[in-house]
């Protein structure tokens, strides 16, 4: 059974999505349905691809195994808002 769903989205997002589906020769409905299926039917987390820049930067910073980033960030915020 199919049902109608109304979404409220930013105009720019809608325009980009329409361009995307035109290039892929599919429909917005099928893209949205596939997205929801990937979120709800798979037990595995959704697979996202990162930009080349993120891939390039990944692993550049090496931190100690016991580095406490929460404490460090809390300390930063304390100093910032003194």
Image: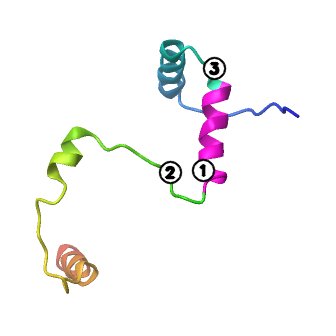
User: Answer yes or no: do the residues labelled 1 and 2 have beta carbons within 8 Å?
Assistant: yes
Q: In the rendered image, is residue 26 in sight?
A: yes
**Residue shown at 26%/80% (left/top)?**
74
User: Answer yes or no: do the residues labelled 3 and 2 have beta carbons within 8 Å?
Assistant: no
Label 1 neighbour load within 10 Å: few <14, some 14-19, many 20+: some
Q: Position of residue 80 (x, y in %)?
A: 19, 73
Q: Which residue is mark 3?
A: 27
Q: Which numbered dot is residue 69?
A: none
Q: Which residues are magenta?
A: 29-42
Vertical position of residue 13 compared to residue 61: above or below: above
Q: Quadrant of residue 75?
A: bottom left
Q: Quadrant of the C terminus?
A: bottom left
The earlier-in-sequence mark between 1 and 3 is: 3
Q: Which numbered dot is residue 39?
A: 1
User: Residues under labels 1 and 2: Cα distance?
Assistant: 6 Å
**Residue 30 belongs to the span the image colors magenta:** yes
């Amino acid at each position: 059974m199919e049902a109608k769903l109304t979404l409220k989205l930013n105009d720019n997002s809608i325009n980009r999505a329409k361009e995307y589906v035109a290039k892929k020769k599919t429909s917005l409905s099928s893209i949205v349905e596939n997205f929801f299926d990937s979120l709800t039917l798979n037990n595995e987390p959704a697979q996202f691809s990162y930009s080349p820049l993120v891939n390039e930067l990944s692993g550049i910073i090496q931190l100690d195994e016991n580095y406490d980033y929460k404490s460090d960030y809390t300390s930063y915020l304390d100093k910032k808002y003194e």
